[in-house]
Image: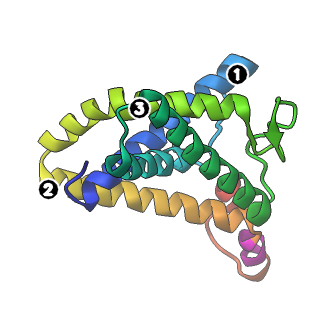
Amino acid sequence: MYDNFYDLVIYFMFYSFSGWLLEVAYAWYKERRFINRGFLLGPLCPVYGFGILLILLISSKFKSNLPLANIVSIMLLTTILEYMTGYILETLFNVKAWDYSNEFCNLKGRICLKFSLAWGLLGYFVIYKLHPIVLQHVKIADEGMKVFMSHILLGGLLADAAIVILSKTGFMKHIKSRVRISIPLHIFKT
């Protein structure tokens, strides 16, 4: 599946960005306007990156010859990840990024049957159709460039996450009230 850490970083970032595109397109379809559906400021939805990496790692060990078995296992993995992500966002940051309360067969509005099925089918498509193409491109990329890009992308992701987490936890308001800072703090609002 991968040769090294840097391949994983490239996959993670690619699928996090692809997930963000999917979320923005879905929001555009529903609302007819641009909505940044990510928790971060930048164009990434890390839950997609983590989800695909998790599926890749597990499916490489337990791949079945039966497509339905693969779809069901992907569906279960992504549903558990979606529930845990929703729980963490709600508990730690008081953010409800999605709400399936009005959907049939939902659990606390965090997961529902319709989207679990969708994630299973989408995950199957990604793993068996899209990822082999991504894998080919990553394999032929220069190792030095992969290392460089991984450092840049991870640095950007960590900076973005730090800004969002500090602003969501009220840390920036605390700093603003204690210290006079010469940069405008409004740039850290999310």
Disc 3 vs disc 1: which is toward the camera?
3
Is residue 104 in sight in this rendering? yes
Residue at 84%, 47% (x, y): give it: 108
> Within the magenta stretch, is there residue 65?
no
Residue 3 appears in which quarter of the rendering? Answer: bottom left
Name the secondary structure under disc 2. helix
The answer to whether mark 2 and mark 1 are in CB contact below 8 A is no
Amino acid under disc 2:
Gly
Sequence order check, earlier mark of 3 and 2: 3
Crowding at mark 1 (Cα within 10 Å: few <14, some 14-19, many 20+)? few
Q: Residue at x 68, y 26 (%)?
A: 27
Residue under the point 44% across and 57% down: 156
Taking depth in this image into account, of 177 and 16 the one nearest to the observer is 16
Q: What's the magenta region?
A: 171-176
Residue where numbered disc 2 is placed: 144
**Mark 2 and mark 1: span between their CA atoms?**
40 Å
Q: CA distance from mark 3 to mark 1?
A: 27 Å
Residue 143: percent from left, percent from top: 14, 53
Residue 148 as seen in the image, left or right of residue 78? left
Please provide percent x and percent y for residue 65: 34, 33
* Tag 3: amino acid: Val
Circle on res. 126: 3
